[in-house]
Amino acid sequence: DAGVTQSPTHLIKTRGQQVTLRCSPKSGHDTVSWYQQALGQGPQFIFQYYEEEERQRGNFPDRFSGHQFPNYSSELNVNALLLGDSALYLCASSRGPDYEQYFGPGTRLTVT
Amino acid sequence: QQPVQSPQAVILREGEDAVINCSSSKALYSVHWYRQKHGEAPVFLMILLKGGEQKGHDKISASFNEKKQQSSLYLTASQLSYSGTYFCATRDFGNEKLTFGTGTRLTIIP
């Protein structure tokens, strides 16, 4: 049974560029949540997708956007990258918005 | 408001017990516990729902005090593999997002 997968593993971008991160949920899961984790900090909630809609959003600017596809996979897009966007981006899936979340390995984004 | 965990860090010898506390200022619907090793993703340990207590693993258990909005994680007879940073994550009523706590770094030495 495949767990949550994310791609790419690592990414280096230049300030001002745009990036797209991808996530495939665990089999049987229909809900995807995205988190940003800075070095030495806990994960910070970005947003959650369920039934292809954004259900809830954390305190992140509109530069952060997402999408969920009919097969429940999801994308996180970040526009106009800032140096402060450098972090580990984690995707977590669950079998519904009310259930425990399982994390993927993350995408390490470095903005130079 | 981020849940506060205590202690911030603890060092134990293999076989010793540990308790990690998590406290929130909000009325909680559920508390989730995760362990994260350096360079890896958080791993789900267990979830505690309002009105119940759930044990996720043999030597790892947890409690949830609804009146005090506090949860504690108990690690019994710790093993080297228990080393890592432990996070509680809380979900408030009417709010589906998880808010992660400040974290507790646990180091187990032989």
Image (tube, grey):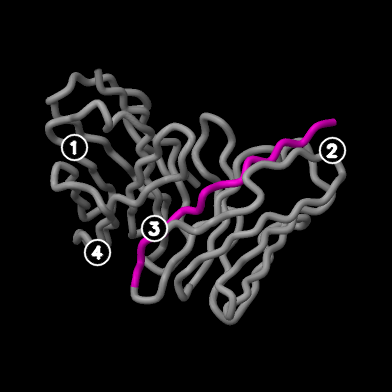
> Depth-wise, is mark 2 or mark 3 nearer the camera?
2
Q: Which residue is at the front of the view, A76 or B95? A: B95
Residue at 50%, 70% (x, y): give it: B30
Residue at 66%, 62% (x, y): give it: B72
Measure the C-alpha gap from mark 2 to mark 3.
Answer: 38 Å
Magenta part of the chain: B95-110
Q: Chain of mark 2?
A: B
Residue at 34%, 53% (x, y): give it: A33
> Which numbered tag is attached to residue B13?
2
According to the picture, the residue beneath numbered tag 1 turns out to be: A78
User: Does dot 3 land on a helix, a strand or a loop?
Assistant: loop
Q: Are marks 2 and 3 on the same chain?
A: no
Q: Amino acid at mark 4?
A: Arg
According to the picture, the residue beneath numbered tag 3 turns out to be: A29
Mark 1 or 4 closer to N-term? 4
According to the picture, the residue beneath numbered tag 4 turns out to be: A55
Q: Amino acid at mark 1?
A: Val
Q: Are marks 2 and 3 in contact (CB under 8 Å)?
A: no
Is A50 covered by the magenta stretch?
Answer: no
Q: Which residue is at the front of the view, A76 or B74? A: B74
> Depth-wise, is mark 3 or mark 4 nearer the camera?
4
Measure the C-alpha gap from mark 1 to mark 4.
Answer: 18 Å
